[in-house]
Image (cartoon, rainbow, N blue to C red):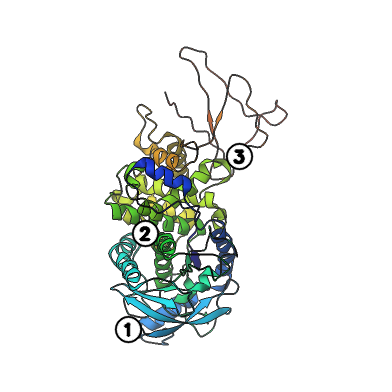
Amino acid sequence: MIKSDEGDAVPSTNLLASTRGVIASLEAGPAFKGAAQDEFEQKIRRLERATLDVPVAQRAFRNRTYGALRNYSISAAIPTIGEKTTFKIPGSAQPCTNFTSLTATVQYISTRAIIYTDDASPPGGFTSTDFQQIGDEFDALIYPTGVAYFGTPIDLDNNGRVVILYTPEVNKLTPANNPGGFVGGFFFAGDLFPSSGVNSCPQSNVAELFYLLSPDPDGTINGNKRSTASVRQGTRGTIAHEFQHMINASETIRSTIKHEFESVWLNEALSHLIEEATGRVLKGIGPAENADFARLSSNINDFNAYFFQNFARFRGYLQAPGVNPPTSAEAESSLAVRGAAWAFLRYTADHYSPNGNERELTRALVVGPDTGVVNLVKRTNAPFDTLLAGWMVANYADDLGIPGLAQKYTYRSYNIRSNVAAITTPSRTYPLVVNQIGTGSYVSPTLQAKSGTGNYFQFARPAGAQARTFRFLNPDGRTTASFTGATLYILRSQ
């Protein structure tokens, strides 16, 4: 599977001491990722499901493991700095057969990573200090967090390391004259497949490999200038995101039973979860601590790298909850659906993790072999309707100060109102759309509700007033409407 990070407009990366300074930065900051990444994501995901046959990789891995039909590289050799290697980068159409060969040079070797740059990279790229910082962050933060939450990468090349390749081939995925949005990078599961044999992937590098955006200060590629600072900052979360996809694909291939790649919405939700989990580890915030914006944004660089994207995507859901169900296949193309999927998984992990341990839940989800909703329900031992009801109520009720509210109707890990309101300009208010019902009829000719989500309504009844009766009517205003499978949840807020 080709997996790539996707995001919304990321603000300035200046380190700011005060919350007011952070807010000013959020107002003025340039855009990162967004539409370019989204477009790439839609196209490549359709291709991955059509071109990769999981049993082929499973059989090849088993044969390698037991010493027969060695379809994979078994070299444990670790290159030296300055050594050159040829890689094959998948194209955006028929990636296993439509690929580009390139030569790259080793720039840094850490305990868990080998960092290469494409020899065709534009001038003015990363320094040796930059490469060391990238490798050190991967070793000390991203790798151990990803392993703790999901398991280990498959390590086909037996060197205990992940290859991080900065290449202008990724820069080319962003349309011309689009300096504010970009494709940050991706992982391709074809690199974990055999490169020869029936239904193999000739493109495969037979290695655990990320492809990342190259710095391009002069905008030599498609006229899009990419400073070293912006690429470094903009791909920190990308590396964490893609690492989950790598481990997820690894677990699928390692499985000894029939297995499919994870459903898009859950696979993406897990990658978005590890972004913020990595940020929490970096900042020393425990999984169950109710973190607000002031705490998360004490270092704006870290907030932008690991938290901003998830809250921004979720903001899109809150602005149109009825049409962005978290478990929808539209996670392939919709940022709002991805935001909902992350928030739904985040809420579920808060309240339904086995033994109260969210890492136990995420590791179980990655192992499968079930996928999607079936996987989530089995691993939480909770009905889907229960998960969805609690989450939808929490989206409104979290940290609202409702007396006597059961904890299951909140997020344990975040003050969700504080964080989303802080990045919502210019109002700085929580953007959940709540439809107000007055004393007369409520009519909305445009309101929609898709399966797996719903809309929010609010009405008031003065103390001592008569009870109110509500009916859902068809457009004729007389006959009762029928909503097969629909459920109405009522929350008394005062």
| Distance between mark 3 and mark 2 Cα atoms | 33 Å
| Distance between mark 2 and mark 1 Cα atoms | 37 Å
Q: Earlier in the sequence, mark 3 or mark 1?
A: 1
- Name the mark nearer the viewer: 3 or 2: 2
Label 3: few (<14), some or many (≥20) within 10 Å? few
Residue that badge 2 annotates: 364
Tag 1, which secondary structure? loop
Q: Earlier in the sequence, mark 2 or mark 1?
A: 1
- Left or right of 487? Residue 85 is left
Residue that badge 3 annotates: 484
**Foreground of the two, 468 or 382:** 468
Tag 2, which secondary structure? helix
- Name the mark nearer the viewer: 2 or 1: 1
Mark 3 is on which residue type?
A: Thr
The single residue placed furthest to the top in the displayed view is 464
Residue 473, relative to residue 339: is it above or below? above
Evaluate if marks 2 and 1 touch, with contact meaning CB atoms under 8 Å apart.
no
What is the x, y in percent for residue 288? 30, 45
Label annotation for residue 206: none
The residue at the point 49 percent across, 57 percent down is 32
What is the x, y in percent for residue 452? 53, 45
Label 2: few (<14), some or many (≥20) within 10 Å? many
Mark 1 is on which residue type?
A: Thr
- Name the mark nearer the viewer: 3 or 1: 1
Residue that badge 1 annotates: 80
**Foreground of the two, 71 or 46:** 46
Residue 65, relative to residue 476: is it above or below? below
Q: Earlier in the sequence, mark 3 or mark 2?
A: 2
